[in-house]
């Protein structure tokens, strides 16, 4: 495909994966440009230096049972960089006390009332038992809010003490606004298969236990030096032209290909290409698609976003942390004086990831803030740090003064998979499929985790490659030919 010209809009992991795959498929002569309005690559993956250690303040891990990231790491020569967490498990602050998550649960939803008795009040246990007297549950292909379904079937406490800490960690939103089929698909599948109650569906959805002689495979993985290792290698292997700090203002069809208007409103440059991959958040995708694929733009406009903040802290060497991988905080929990918690979770990296230590032995951890309430994120960094330190002291007793800190704010960083999200995405993809030379990727589509984003980047690259191969020889020229 000598002379093929492709623009990838969005320099996150989905866009960079697409650029890498396009380079492999189209060869060294193809012109590939990656455009991002930010001043760095990586999107919501960000590795900072914290006490001399590469430390992630975006996503910190990936689901190891999905094959995309290990496969991509092997392709990039990064297998030796992959690490797994320790066997430490997370603690839970619920009902005013520190406890543990139920041993048998799906996204925090317990398999029985008895397995959650240590987390729920007596009223909460009775609410779970009461499900047996309800009519059998029939989904019949419909979608429903996770919170609404669970509140009606097993009570409010299951939602607020168990489900919210886990779903809120993934989506930074509320269970009441998230759709079951997109966020807890295993439970939806069990209900579709005939389970007539929530507890029966959870039991059906639980993974098959490993034989006694086999240890459980790790659930999560990470990169030893942070996700920057992956981002840097993807950029290097793609050999793409990287243009940062440049918003893409418009997208239109032009002479069998595409024309992008890039840069400032008064001095925009024009870029003509044969194909485009859009790997940007829903609001940007809606704006760029509004004229060329109105139906897809309309679907993108229905996807809401939530914001979150991650605070990294390095504590003095020798600081003792609890024997847990982290602490999840249930919705509505307060300090002993009645002050609400600011953090929704702490990751005790020193316990969870044995390789993570500051260059001088500093103890590293991170706090996550954001449950869908924008007001709690408006405080400045100093006040936010004060609040999460107070939370840490209340939850763990650790009061050591940090020797280094870092704050990453992710405004509108996480798409909310609301009720009917799968149908929305299907409609978006169907509309775009009818437009040659255009493909979508990113967290809006089929999952907010890194493996899902990698998968969408690979799929988008395949769509573009198939299109270019089908249309035959492409126009000559280089992407460097920018016009005012």
Image (tube, helix red, strand yellow):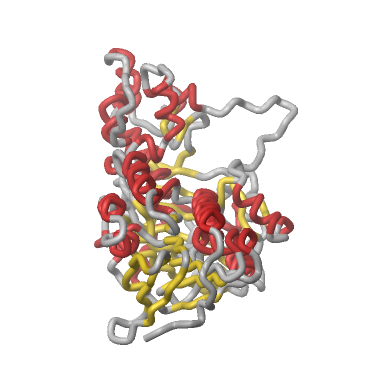
Q: Is residue 127 left or right of residue 219?
A: left
Give above or below for 357 relative to 109.
Answer: below
Q: Residue at x 62, y 45 (%)?
A: 67
Q: Nearer the viewer, residue 227 or 73?
A: 73
Q: Residue at x 38, y 82 (%)?
A: 269
Q: Residue at x 51, y 77 (%)?
A: 479
The quadrant where residue 10 appears: bottom left
Q: Is residue 94 left or right of residue 53?
A: left
Residue 388: image location, x then y, percent: 40, 62
Q: Is residue 52 left or right of residue 263?
A: right
The quadrant where residue 156 appears: top left
Give above or below for 266 relative to 463.
Answer: below
User: Which of the image's four quarters has the N terminus?
Assistant: bottom right
Residue 367: image location, x then y, percent: 45, 59
Residue 57: image location, x then y, percent: 49, 64
Residue 357 visible somewhere in the drawing:
no
Residue 183: image location, x then y, percent: 40, 40
Q: Residue at x 56, y 46 (%)?
A: 63
Give above or below for 274 relative to 126.
Answer: below
Residue 240 visible somewhere in the drawing:
yes
């Amino acid at each position: 495909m000598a002379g093929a010209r492709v623009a990838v809009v969005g320099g996150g992991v989905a866009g960079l994966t697409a650029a890498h795959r396009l380079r492999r498929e189209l060869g060294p002569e193809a012109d590939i440009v990656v455009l991002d309005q930010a001043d760095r690559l990586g999107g919501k993956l960000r590795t900072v230096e914290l006490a001399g250690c590469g430390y992630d303040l975006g996503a910190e891990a990936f689901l190891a049972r999905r094959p995309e990231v290990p496969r991509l790491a092997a392709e990039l020569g990064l297998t030796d960089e992959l690490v797994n967490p320790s066997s430490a498990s997370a603690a839970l602050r619920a009902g005013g006390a520190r406890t543990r998550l139920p041993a048998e649960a799906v996204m925090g939803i317990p398999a029985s009332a008895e397995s959650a008795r240590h987390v729920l009040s007596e009223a909460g246990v009775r609410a779970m038992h009461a499900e047996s007297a309800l009519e059998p549950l029939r989904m019949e292909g419909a979608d429903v809010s996770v919170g609404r379904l669970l509140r009606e079937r097993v009570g409010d406490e299951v939602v607020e003490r168990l489900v919210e800490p886990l779903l809120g960690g993934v989506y930074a939103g509320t269970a009441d606004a998230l759709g079951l089929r997109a966020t807890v698909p295993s439970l939806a599948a069990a209900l579709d298969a005939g389970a007539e109650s929530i507890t029966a569906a959870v039991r059906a959805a639980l993974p098959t236990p490993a034989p006694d002689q086999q240890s459980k495979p790790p659930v999560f993985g990470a990169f030893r030096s942070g996700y920057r290792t992956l981002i840097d290698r993807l950029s290097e292997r793609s050999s793409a032209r990287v243009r940062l700090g440049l918003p893409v203002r418009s997208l239109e069809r032009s002479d069998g290909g595409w024309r992008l208007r890039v840069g400032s409103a008064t001095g925009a440059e024009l870029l003509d290409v044969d194909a485009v991959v859009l790997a940007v958040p829903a609001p940007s995708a809606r704006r760029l698609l509004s004229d060329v694929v109105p139906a897809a733009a309309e679907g993108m406009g229905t996807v809401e976003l939530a914001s979150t903040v991650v605070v990294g802290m390095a504590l003095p060497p020798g600081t003792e942390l609890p024997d847990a991988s982290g602490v999840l905080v249930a919705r509505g929990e307060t300090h002993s004086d009645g002050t609400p918690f600011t953090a929704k979770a702490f990751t005790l990296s020193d316990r969870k990831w044995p390789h993570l230590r500051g260059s001088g032995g500093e103890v590293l951890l991170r706090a996550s803030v954001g449950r869908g309430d924008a007001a709690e994120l408006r405080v400045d960094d100093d006040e936010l740090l004060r609040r999460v330190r107070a939370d840490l002291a209340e939850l763990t007793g650790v009061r050591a003064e940090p020797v280094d800190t870092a704050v990453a704010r992710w405004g509108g960083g996480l798409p909310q998979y609301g009720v009917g999200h799968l149908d929305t995405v299907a409609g978006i993809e169907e509309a775009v499929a009818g437009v040659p030379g255009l493909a979508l990727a990113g967290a809006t589509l089929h999952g907010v985790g890194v493996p899902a984003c990698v998968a969408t980047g690979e799929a988008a690259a395949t769509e573009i490659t198939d299109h270019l191969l089908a249309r035959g020889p492409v126009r000559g020229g280089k992407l460097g030919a920018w016009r005012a």
